[in-house]
Amino acid sequence: MCLSEEVFAEYVEVLNRDKFSKYINFKTKAEVVMNRLRELAIFYQTDRKIEVLTDTTDNEFHFQKLR
């Protein structure tokens, strides 16, 4: 799996939202998954940012050309 630091940070931010606190041990389980993901993923940096989506915060999830 390939990830950018920005995408990984977005995953962490979403998983820490209050709406998930109603699930037993959610935060602990999410941390386990995210730690494993960090170990296994190949992290990359893009050489440009794109602005193609109306919700600009989701642009990082649209295809970005790798260096």
Image (tube, rainbow, N blue to C red):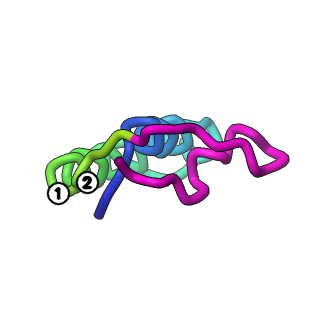
Look at the magenta stretch and give its main secondary structure.
loop
Question: Is residue 16 inside the magenta stretch?
Answer: no
Question: Is residue 56 inside the magenta stretch?
Answer: yes
Q: Residue furthest left?
A: 39
Q: Position of residue 33 (x, y in %)?
A: 28, 54
Q: Amino acid at mark 2?
A: Leu
Q: Position of residue 47 (x, y in %)?
A: 44, 38
Mark 2 touches mark 1? (CB < 8 Å): yes
Residue in front for this viewpoint, 24 or 61: 61
Which residue in the structure is indicated by mark 1? 40
Q: Position of residue 45 (x, y in %)?
A: 35, 39
Asked whether, in this view, residue 55 is left or right of residue 58, the answer is right
Which residue in the structure is indicated by mark 2? 37
Residue stretch rendered in magenta on the structure: 46-67
Q: Position of residue 2 (x, y in %)?
A: 31, 58
Q: Amino acid at mark 1?
A: Leu
